[in-house]
Image (cartoon, grey):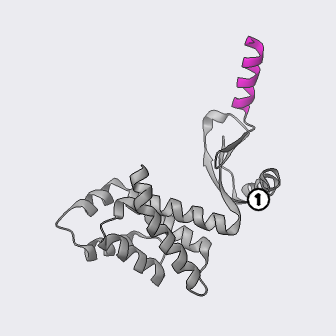
Amino acid sequence: MAELATIARPYAEALFKACKSVAGTDMTAAASWTDELAAIAANPQMRSLADNPKVNAGQLFDVFTSIARSQLPDLARNFLKTVIDNGRVDVLPEIAAQFRSLVNGSTGSSDALVYSAFPMDAAALADLGTTLEKRFGRKLNLSGKVDESLIGGVRVVVGDEVLDTSVKARLEQMKAALTA
């Protein structure tokens, strides 16, 4: 994967500089549409379409923009055209990851993935977010995911840090203590 990271880095850095230079560009919104484009590019059907020699760059661009849930700003459209013209659609997920990393670095925040046994509504996630921001000492961009194997509680992953307060983890600790 080092090769993909090497290819993606200049694109991510150029997009980051372009977003900073265009007045009124919201970095969080830019990271959002970049993630959306990456999700579209990661789809196996889109990959096969991008690899099809009968599909030209204009057609591929039209497919991308029609699939996108939101209207893409001009910066996003220009970025997407550049990526497609250079044949780098397969690198788009890595570009998005590196761009998000650059945005997080500039804002002093981190992405956090909260695994819970049951779906959490936005209010519960926001309440948990304030507690987690105190615990980790930085602003967190939370996203939730359901993992029924946790039984109860939550498991939070922030970069390489993990906070596991799930019932499953506590049962594992009890098991280890009893067998020791």
| 95, 80: nearer the viewer | 95
Callout 1 secondary element: loop
Quarter of the image for residue 93 reads bottom left
Residue 39 in view here: no
User: Is 130 left, or right, of 118 in this rendering?
Assistant: right
Residue 170 falls in which quadrant of the image? top right
Q: Is residue 172 magenta?
A: yes
Viewer-side residue, 38 vs 160: 160
Q: Residue furthest left?
A: 54
Q: Quadrant of the C terminus?
A: top right
Q: In this rendering, is residue 78 above or below 34?
A: below
Amino acid marked by disc 1: Arg
Residue range of the region highlighted in magenta in the rendering? 167-180
Where is mark 1, residue-wise? 138
Residue at 39% in and 69% down: 67
Query: Left or right of 4: which side holds 22?
Result: right
Q: Residue at x 36, y 75 (%)?
A: 82
Say if 88 sits above or below 117 in the image.
Answer: below
- Magenta stretch holds residue 90: no
Percent x, y of residue 22: 55, 85
Q: Residue at x 36, y 70 (%)?
A: 83
